[in-house]
Image: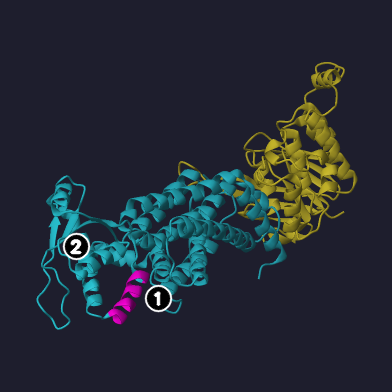
Chain colours: A cyan, B yellow
């Protein structure tokens, strides 16, 4: 537990950080803007697909097919005559038109011949067709099953597909939060230490019988508090405004966040001890931060990267953090299931802590 | 009488900025003794090694050669025990901008594991009405007085002041001298560095003059004057121009 001195120091650091309104604002402003932009860009995945439907049959089954398509939120169904919709398709107002021909009839349970549905597509939008067609096909298969009376099995499958169907933002959020934890923590310890040293504040503090470990403990605890507040605000924004889902346990998600923050605070202390000036810490900080943003699977899975960088990418601290957070948020895994990521973080924590306590110097560094 | 501070052949070496393989001695074999209740002044031009000498005594800078004892404690072996019993006012100290004076004093109290009465300390340095102010909003003289208040939180046996009056106007300077005298009268040993000869003469019981990292003279101001100063060309004037300045602008503090 913290000693009285450490608590007092941590409380004061907390005050200092919280009173720095400007930096708190910007530390939240950019991530929020960032997430919003991605939400807008990738929001298309959630938007319904426009689908023209032409019903030339008067059978009840055809009616039912149209109804079922209309009920599905994945599609915006516009019904009409084939000629009208074909014109709209050519004009680019429609992407796909599904035609149920006059001989459309309920598919017999005993088999019967396949129902001939025609799909009209605009070739100029053909590049989107591969994305949309499987969805339509899946829907038709689902409808077919319902016609055939395989409802029970079918409805279970739909539930699963719904819960796990992640759009890009769901995938991205844990990555972005991991990245922000890294930036906020590295900046929170490293940049502060360099600033304190440059101003002579460190020297003034160590005129007193203050032990470096008390100083480091206090700043880590205070920073951790701030980072958790920031994490909560960003998470709340993502959940309530952008409608991102977290499937796993929230407490476990936070716990991984705390461990991640500790890892990066230590790394920040190391950078802060090496860097003599503000410019130096910016440069060294960027060298540490940017490769991780690119390589640690924040924006796309590591598997998608060229083979020769993968061994490096696999062992970066942010990789463990992002995969841990993502496994909980997206796949609903538990702490037990993400033990490999936790071990990775633990190793980095030990390395960071050993280096930070060894390298930390409060004495004035000759510039 | 045993000295409260003993510096024996202190050496501090730095590598040369343009040639890292060579070093120069910022402090080059300095020895002196300071007695309890004394005000001891270290004088010298910029770069003479005054601040470095103080920092070695304070446990802020590694001692490369020789040894230093403060109240019987070997500074190199146990800097933490030394830090507990000394108060230090650094040249150009900065503080956390986001805390006010009371919060800062409480923080320093905590660093010494002491419960302190911050308002009483501020009263001692005439800053009571600035209790809620941030250090950035203090004038030069107020900042120096606040630095001294910070140096007093642990009720130190020895107070180190590094150029306490540099950059202050005469009113603020005189006020600071009064404060130093008061503390000394109350029994505190004071070690200070200064460029200001008048300050050394006014405050210090004994003076050491440093140049190029060495001690070139040490004695009471009077004996130093007798030994080294050339005969004055004529009888001294009525005071000096600073007395005129103070007579015309008053002794009241301007900040």
Residue B78 is at least partly visible in this image: no
Element on which disc 2 rests: helix
Element on which disc 1 rests: helix
Q: Residue at x 41, y 53 (%)?
A: A35
Residue at mark 1 to residue at mark 2: CA–CA distance: 38 Å
- Nearest the camera: A171 or B122? A171
> Can you say which quadrant of the picture contains the N terminus of chain A?
bottom right
- Nearest the camera: A295 or A353? A295
Above or below — where is A135 with respect to B122? below
**Can you tell which mark lies on residue A133?**
2
From which residue to which does the magenta span run? A151-163
Residue B216 is at least partly visible in this image: yes
Q: Is residue A162 magenta?
A: yes
Secondary structure mostly taken by the magenta-highlighted segment of the chain: helix
Q: Is residue A109 magenta?
A: no
Q: Chain of mark 1?
A: A
Badge 1 density bin: few <14, some 14–19, many ≥20, Cα 10 Å? some
Position of A13 with respect to A354 (left or right) is: right
Query: Which sits earlier in the primary sequence, circle 1 or circle 2?
Result: 2
**Can you tell which mark lies on residue A172?**
none
- State the residue position of label 1: A340
Q: How many numbered marks appear?
A: 2
Position of A135 with respect to B197 (left or right) is: left
Residue lying farthest to the bottom in this orientation:
A110
Where is residue A16? Give x, y as percent: 64, 50
């Amino acid at each position: 537990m913290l000693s009285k001195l450490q608590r007092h120091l941590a409380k004061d650091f907390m005050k200092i950080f919280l009173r720095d309104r400007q930096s708190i604002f910007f530390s939240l402003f950019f991530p929020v803007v960032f997430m919003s932009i991605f939400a807008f860009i990738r929001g298309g995945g959630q938007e319904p697909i426009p689908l023209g439907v032409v019903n030339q049959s008067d059978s009840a089954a055809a009616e039912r097919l149209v109804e079922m398509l209309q009920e599905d939120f994945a599609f915006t169904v516009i019904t009409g005559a084939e000629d009208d919709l074909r014109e709209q398709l050519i004009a680019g107002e429609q992407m796909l038109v599904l035609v149920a021909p006059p001989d459309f009839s309920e598919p017999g349970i005993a088999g019967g011949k396949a129902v001939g549905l025609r799909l009209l597509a605009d070739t100029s939008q053909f590049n989107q067709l591969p994305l949309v067609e499987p969805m339509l096909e899946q829907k038709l298969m689902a409808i077919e099953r319902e016609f055939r009376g395989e409802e029970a099995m079918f409805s279970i499958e739909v539930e699963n597909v719904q819960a796990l169907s992640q759009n890009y933002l769901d995938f991205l959020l844990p990555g972005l939060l991991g990245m922000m934890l890294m930036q906020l923590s590295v900046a929170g310890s490293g940049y502060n230490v360099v600033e304190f040293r440059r101003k002579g504040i460190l020297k003034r503090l160590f005129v007193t019988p203050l032990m470096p470990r008390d100083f480091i403990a206090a700043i880590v605890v205070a920073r951790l508090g701030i980072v958790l507040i920031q994490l909560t605000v960003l998470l709340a924004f993502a959940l309530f405004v952008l409608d991102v889902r977290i499937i796993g346990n929230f407490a476990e998600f936070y716990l991984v966040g705390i461990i991640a923050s500790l890892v990066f605070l230590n790394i920040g202390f190391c950078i802060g001890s090496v860097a003599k000036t503000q410019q130096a810490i910016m440069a060294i900080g960027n060298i540490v931060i940017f490769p991780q943003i690119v390589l640690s699977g924040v924006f796309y899975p590591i598997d998608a990267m060229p083979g020769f960088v993968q061994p490096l990418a696999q062992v970066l601290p942010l990789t463990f953090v992002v995969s841990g957070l993502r496994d909980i948020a997206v796949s609903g895994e538990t702490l037990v299931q993400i033990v490999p990521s936790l071990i990775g973080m633990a190793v980095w924590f030990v390395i960071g802590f050993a280096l930070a306590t060894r390298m930390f110097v409060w004495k004035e560094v000759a510039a | 009488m045993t000295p409260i501070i003993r510096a024996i052949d202190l050496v501090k070496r730095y590598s040369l900025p343009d040639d890292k393989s060579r070093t120069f001695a910022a402090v080059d074999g300095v020895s002196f003794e300071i007695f309890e209740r004394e005000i001891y002044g270290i004088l010298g031009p910029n770069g003479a090694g005054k601040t470095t000498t103080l920092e070695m005594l304070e446990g802020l800078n590694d001692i490369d050669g020789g040894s230093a004892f403060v109240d019987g404690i070997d500074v190199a072996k146990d800097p933490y025990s030394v830090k507990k019993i000394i108060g230090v006012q650094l040249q150009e100290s900065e503080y956390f901008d986001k805390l006010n004076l009371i919060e800062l004093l409480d923080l320093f109290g905590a660093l010494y594991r002491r419960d302190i009465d911050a308002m009483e300390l501020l009263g001692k340095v005439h800053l009571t009405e600035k209790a809620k102010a941030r250090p950035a909003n203090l004038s030069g003289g107020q900042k120096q007085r606040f630095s001294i208040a910070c140096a007093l939180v642990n009720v130190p046996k020895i107070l180190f002041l590094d150029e306490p009056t540099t950059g202050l106007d005469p009113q603020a300077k005189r006020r600071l001298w009064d404060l130093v005298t008061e503390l000394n009268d109350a029994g505190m040993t004071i070690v200070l560095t200064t460029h200001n000869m008048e300050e050394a003469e006014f405050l210090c019981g004994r003076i050491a003059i440093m140049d190029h990292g060495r001690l070139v003279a040490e004695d009471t101001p009077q004996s130093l004057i007798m030994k080294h100063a050339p005969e004055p060309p004529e009888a001294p004037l009525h005071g000096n121009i600073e007395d005129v300045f103070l007579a015309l602008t008053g002794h009241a503090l301007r900040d």
